[in-house]
């Protein structure tokens, strides 16, 4: 007992010394900043959120007050549209799309102040400061057009177009969650606006030609080029970019449809300027494009959903990479289902008995190579199992022998 007590006291003293050293080390250690980010800073309102709301209020107030209510005593947009009517001016009903644009952007301007959306990449990196430019240029266009400075209004509308496509490009490259709320609240307001300003820019070019009092053949040439350019835009947004912009294509269809409708009325100015054959030709050209664009939308949709109806249809790796997360989920689920079905012993068919063994395995290796090259894993696994079964049954042509003959 006498020998144990001193040892216990020594152990207690050493433990006390260690505690003192640890406390001193903690006190003298340099403080390091925390690497965690306060979540509240992520959802804090910033200048972009505030400026977006202010820009929207100024935009809708001045555009409506000057362009429609005639606050400055100038003609409203409807009167000026009739004064400078072109052969591709749509019916006045077409301009009701502005109600959709302003309502959608009004909802966006308010909702982007909420914690759920204020720090969203589609707001901070997508709309960013581009929306301020959109509002400023649109106010400038309203004043220029009201005072009939048509060339200046053309410059402003092209700047509006540039700013809107700046938003679309930034949102296209911003981080997206692919949700419906993101599309309808944060992206749709600018897509529908961009689609209409695309059509309005082409119209403004024709208005400038009319304001310059150019002869009918010049007006007709510019009108035809305008229609072709708008159709080219629809092809671009549907087939050139990897993630189609359906909204712009639909808005252009709306514009072409109302151009056709307006040419059925035949205003005095159009009848005095163009021959009846010319009017009919442009009218049916607008109708044709109004039908072609929806047809293109159907074709593009079919190209997108086609692989999901037949999982064995091959898609290139590049196309697979640009599919949205929702599309990838559908494709993964389809492959999982196909794999589960294939694993059932009654589903995977045995190789045809009448074929020579060598022909069977050569055909299977060709299909296996194609499946691997195109990333169709379910098909590749199926062919690997069939090849393994064949090689287990017969040693006439082994894997090594085949590789030496077929891949040499």
Image (spheres, rainbow, N blue to C red):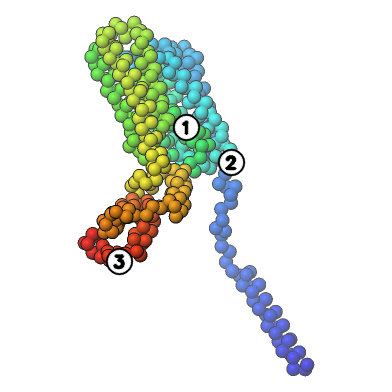
Secondary structure under tag 1 reads: helix
**Looking at the rendering, which quadrant does residue 43 occupy?**
top right
Q: Position of residue 40 (x, y in %)?
A: 60, 47
Secondary structure under tag 2 reads: loop
Q: CA distance from mark 3 to mark 1?
A: 62 Å
Q: Position of residue 206 (x, y in %)?
A: 31, 18
How crowded pointer 2 is (Cα within 10 Å; few <14, some 14-19, many 20+) is rated as some
Q: CA distance from mark 2 to mark 1?
A: 20 Å
The residue at 35%/65% (across/down) is: 392
- Whether residue 153 is visible: no
Considering only order in the chain, which callout, 2 or 3, is on the residue closer to the N terminus? 2
Which one is closest to the eye, mark 3 or mark 1?
Answer: 3
Q: Which mark is residue 188?
A: 1
**Looking at the rendering, which quadrant does residue 224 occupy?**
top left
Instruction: Check the image and report above or below for 264 versus 110.
Output: above
How crowded pointer 3 is (Cα within 10 Å; few <14, some 14-19, many 20+) is rated as few
Relative to 224, 50 lies left or right: right
Q: Position of residue 337 (x, y in %)?
A: 46, 48
Instruction: Check the image and report above or below for 385 versus 138.
Output: below
Q: Which mark is residue 395?
A: 3
The residue at 41%/53% (across/down) is: 348
Instruction: Give the residue at the far bottom of this rendering.
Output: 2
- Whether residue 35 is visible: yes
Relative to 260, 124 lies left or right: right
Q: Which mark is residue 291?
A: none
């Amino acid at each position: 007992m006498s020998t144990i007590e001193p040892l216990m006291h020594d152990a207690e003293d050493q433990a006390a010394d260690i505690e003192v050293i640890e406390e001193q080390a903690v006190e003298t250690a340099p403080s390091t900043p925390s690497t965690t980010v306060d979540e509240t800073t992520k959802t804090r309102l910033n200048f972009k959120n505030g400026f977006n709301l202010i820009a929207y209020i100024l935009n809708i107030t001045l555009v409506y007050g000057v362009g429609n209510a005639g606050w400055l005593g100038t003609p409203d947009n409807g009167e000026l549209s009739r004064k400078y009517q072109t052969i591709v001016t749509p019916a006045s009903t077409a301009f009701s799309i502005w109600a959709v644009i302003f309502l959608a952007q009004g909802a966006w301007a308010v909702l982007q102040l909420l914690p759920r959306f204020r720090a969203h990449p589609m707001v901070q990196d997508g709309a960013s400061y581009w929306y301020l430019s959109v509002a400023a240029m649109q106010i400038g266009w309203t004043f220029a057009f009201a005072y009939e400075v048509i060339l200046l209004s053309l410059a402003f509308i092209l700047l509006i177009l540039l700013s809107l496509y700046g938003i679309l490009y930034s949102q296209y490259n911003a981080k997206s969650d692919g949700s419906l709320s993101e599309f309808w609240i944060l992206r749709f307001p600018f897509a529908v606006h961009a689609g209409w300003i695309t059509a309005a820019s082409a119209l403004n070019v024709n208005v400038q030609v009319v304001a310059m009092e150019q002869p009918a053949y010049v007006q007709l040439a510019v009108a035809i080029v305008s229609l072709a350019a708008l159709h080219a835009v629809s092809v671009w947004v549907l087939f050139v970019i990897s993630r189609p912009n359906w909204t712009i294509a639909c808005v252009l269809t709306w514009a072409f449809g109302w151009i056709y409708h307006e040419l059925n009325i035949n205003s005095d100015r159009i009848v005095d300027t163009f021959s009846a054959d010319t009017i009919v030709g442009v009218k049916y050209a607008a109708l044709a494009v109004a039908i072609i664009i929806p047809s293109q939308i159907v074709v593009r949709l079919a190209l997108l959903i086609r692989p999901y109806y037949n999982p064995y249809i091959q898609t290139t790796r590049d196309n697979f990479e640009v599919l949205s997360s929702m599309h990838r989920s559908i494709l993964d689920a389809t492959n999982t289902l196909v794999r589960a079905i294939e694993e059932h012993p009654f589903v995977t068919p045995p190789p045809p008995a009448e074929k020579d063994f060598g022909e069977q395995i050569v055909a299977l290796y060709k299909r296996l190579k194609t499946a691997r090259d195109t990333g169709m894993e379910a098909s590749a696994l199926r062919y690997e199992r069939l090849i393994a079964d064949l090689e287990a049954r017969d040693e006439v042509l082994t894997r090594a022998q085949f590789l030496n003959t077929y891949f040499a």
